[in-house]
Amino acid sequence: MSSAKPIILTGDRTTGPLHLGHYVGSLRSRVELQHKAQQYLLLADTQAMTDNVGQHQKVTNNVIEVALDYLAAGIDPELSTIFIQSQVPELAELTQYLLNLVTVSRLERNPTIKEEIRLRGFERDIPAGFLTYPVSQAADITAFKATLVPVGDDQLPMIEQTNELVRKFNSTVDRQVLVECEAVLSSVTRLPGVDGKAKMSKSLNNSISLGASADDIKKAVNRMYTDPNHLRVEDPGQVEGNVVFAFLDAFEPDRNALEELKAQYRHGGLADSVLKRRLNEHLQALLEPIRARRQHFAGDRGEVMNVLRRGTEKARQVAGQTVSEVKSALGLNYFNY
Ligand code: TRP
């Protein structure tokens, strides 16, 4: 037997380019995971359509942007398979079969969906495609027989619901066709916005994009919220809630030095400008090669589309195999005699 690598499936809705928060939260670990696992990366345009009705152009324009971010961050198409969800019709087909195995009330109880409905103000007018997107997500995962799914903790209910569907399907057909998966919490580090708001987001205008110029980075660092009571260098400062320290927690390689800086800041005598200069150097060093790769691929869109075409073809083969097993198990193989 060959030592089979675990199969990973993960992805992002294509509603905008990715930023440093995504890098820390998931991209950084995916770049490492691609060496240890067979990794599929899904550009979730179909899913993005479920809550962007009328904004389909934004969704489709961002497919290439997210792909550029993947390549820029160091996702290697020789190691990872990047593909476009809408171009794998087998996923929609599998979704259709799985939809019969879940009740509307179970979907309405999904905590992630409940929270998103609240955030979007859908109230009673919930698009059916939105309510059922956890089933489509279960299809994404099970079509590849993925065993590991890196997600943020807000997505844990999705994994639970996926595994319920796997058990329900297998017991219905009395065969082990689909495979249960396990969530890998991608990161404990969550970057705040540069303005101190809990979440970094492009729409809040408090993010640093992966393509940010050296000057953008410097300006963002200078803008970062620190401790408003740290007026003079010699005043004691607060580390908690201080954006510069939250970033240093994520990017400072010298952990001992970081502890010393925190102690010195709390005591008094350490200027914000010294910390900001240090953080700026780390961010410049990190983002310079990412920006260069992004520019390289942005100038060769044909090559990027080739990567996506090849990845999508491979994804269709794998998903197609699972869907034919699913259909056979359901007796939907009329012509295969
Ligand atoms: N729900 C994810 C997001 O909001 C995208 C996604 C779609 C996904 N299908 C998936 C993630 C399957 C992990 C596994 O961006």
Image (tube, grey):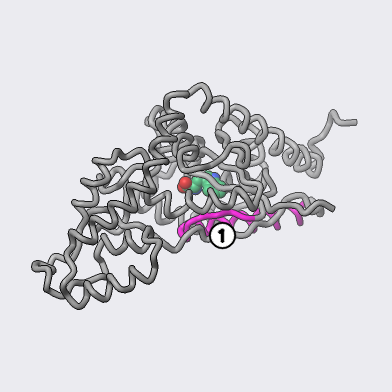
Q: Is residue 184 visible?
A: yes
In x, y percent, where is residue 236?
16, 75
Q: Residue 97's quadrant in the figure?
A: top right
Q: Which residue lies furthest to the left in this view?
A: 232
Instruction: Name the one closer to the observer, 124 or 95.
Output: 95
Instruction: Name the one closer to the observer, 317 or 216.
Output: 216
Q: Could you classify mark 1 by the number of other residues whose Cα lies within 10 Å: few (under 14), some (14-19), or many (20 or more)? A: some
Range of the magenta residues?
148-172
Eyeballing the image, is 76 above or below 252?
above
Quadrant housing the C terminus: top right
In x, y percent, where is residue 109?
49, 59
Eyeballing the image, is 105 above or below 292?
below
Instruction: Name the one closer to the observer, 268 or 104.
Output: 268
Q: Which residue lies furthest to the bottom in this view?
A: 267
**Is residue 167 highlighted in magenta?**
yes
The amino acid beneath tag 1 is: Val
Q: Residue at x 40, y 27 (%)?
A: 57
**Is residue 262 highlighted in magenta?**
no
The residue that mark 1 highlights is 184
In x, y percent, where is residue 95?
62, 41
Q: Is residue 24 left or right of residue 31?
A: left
Mark 1 element type: strand
Q: Residue at x 46, y 32 (%)?
A: 63
Q: Residue 196's quadrant in the figure?
A: bottom left
In x, y percent, where is residue 330?
78, 43
Q: Which residue lies furthest to the right in this view?
A: 337
Q: Which residue is drawn at 9% across and 68% down?
A: 232
Eyeballing the image, is 161 above or below 126?
below
